Image (cartoon, rainbow, N blue to C red):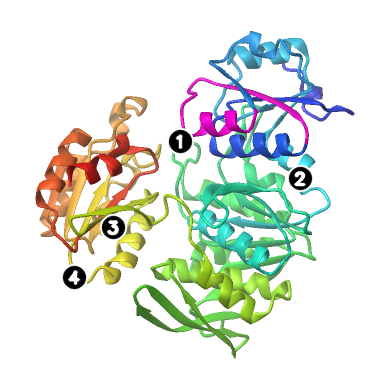
Amino acid sequence: MTMDMTKNRFPDQVRHIHLIAICGTAMGALACMLKEKGYHVTGSDHKVYPPMSDFLKNQGIEIREGFDPLNLDHSPDLVVVGNAVSCDNPEVEAMLKAGYFFCSMPQAVNHFFAQGKKTVVVAGTHGKTTTSSLMAWVLFCAGLDPSYLIGGIVNNFKSNFRIGTGPFMVLEGDEYDTAFFDKGAKFMHYVPDYSVLTSVEFDHADIFRDLDHVKTVFGHYVGLHRNTSVLMAWDSDANIDELIVKTSARVERYGTRAESDWKMENVMITPPWMSFDVYKQGQRFGTFKSPMPGMHNLLNSLSVIAVADHLDIPVHTLQDALMSFKGVKRRQEVRGEKRGVTVMDDFAHHPTAVRETIRALKPFYPDGRLIAVFEPRTNSSMRDVFQKKYPESFDGADMVCIRKPPLLSKIPENHRFSSEKLVADLKAKKIDAHYFDETEGIISFVADRAKSGDLVLIMSNGGFDNIHDRLLKAL
């Protein structure tokens, strides 16, 4: 098949835009933003189900089930192609054969929404969604009416997108690939005016060969920054230390090191708050309180405070915004409480994220046990690349339940992650760990053993068979 790449650009006039793989988080948000801007929007996907399907239909967007050349029978002016589809997708083949104009999701975001805005981009292996969400909320509280597109539902806005009239647009800078015709990272399409780099670790084993490959991609990203850009970089990551020499941006460091431009000190945990002092260039900047548990969340907050200071947002506004931030869905989200047992949902799946989430939450539930329930579901966690790292991630848990990876058939047999081995390794560390083939077994096991005061922390990047609601019913 010959691809006419000259059509990978934008026509002079656009009225009708069709999105292939519309039900992804970012693609669905883009569809709604385009609809809100006045375009006729249609879309297709092979898994059209709630809540995204209902959400899009309520926005007046027509969705067609499955990928079919007939989905293009309205002759759209532009087709946006999601990164989940390949070049042999029947709808993509029909698009190319007909010669329609097409682009990727980040290209569309740049063309239709980021032009003329000052962009604030948050990149890094961890913390992107929470940090960009807090950044958007701070800008809103400051009266700057921001636009944003983020990979999670911001609870304060009840949405993962917004079209504002203000000068700023907040973007979550994703290192995952862009489309079948562009295997580069999505964040390579954004040239930040202000950016945060939270961390650089190996992840996404389905697209990155190793850590050096990850560092190469992030190196290209920091190289995008102009000399007028501000890059806020975490101060305790050796990989970041290597990468920031490749940028012409003004680099500032944030964290806990004495020499950093922005430093956090005097952290106090007084549930439901965490408080900390911030120092700018060695001078006391202010005291802040956050409802988000964990040092990782305080570091995320510190990076936002530092960027916001460059935007001349007053300290008292930052303090109020931080205290009123309600977080992001699926990030330490309490789904309910029954019989005194709290059931929490979290997106953690990387070993570092699992470790930091458990460490963060333990002090907030001092009267009971922390029961960690983990489903290895990502393309990385189902591979054996983190087999030796995961045992160190559960040290703070009182009981651990590990599910068999649900999609192991996608992984070559000699590269598959073993939940049984993880449980054996945890038991060798004297941790009360249990293996389960199915979700049903976890529900009955935990419901039978959970006591008042316990926190059941459920970690997965997927729906986990609706375990949260089912466990609450069982309790």
Residue 178 sits above or below residue 224 on the image: above
Give how far apart the Cα atoms at labels 2 and 3 are: 40 Å
The residue indicated by pointer 3 is 393
Query: Residue flagged by tag 2: what amino acid is it?
Result: Phe
Residue ID at (50%, 24%): 48
Q: Earlier in the sequence, mark 1 or mark 2?
A: 2
Q: Which residue is mark 2?
A: 113
What amino acid is labelled 1 in the image? Asp
Q: CA distance from mark 3 to mark 4?
A: 22 Å
Q: Nearer the viewer, mark 1 or mark 2?
A: 2
Does 74 appear above or below 363? above
Q: What stretch of residues is rendered in magenta? A: 38-60
Q: Which of pointers 4 and 2 lies earlier in the amino acid sequence?
A: 2
Closer to the N terminus: mark 1 or mark 3? 1
Residue 219 location, quadrant? bottom right
User: Where 327 sits versus 441, above or below?
Assistant: below
Number of other residues with Cα within 10 Å of mark 3, as a class: few under 14, some 14 to 19, many 20 or more: some
Q: Which residue is mark 1?
A: 206
Mark 3 vs mark 4, foreground winner is 4
- Pointer 4 residue: 367
Q: Is residue 359 left or right of residue 473?
A: right
Q: Which of the two discs, 2 and 3, sits closer to the camera?
A: 2
Q: Nearer the viewer, residue 444 or 110?
A: 444
Where residue 74 sits in the image (x, y, percent)?
74, 13
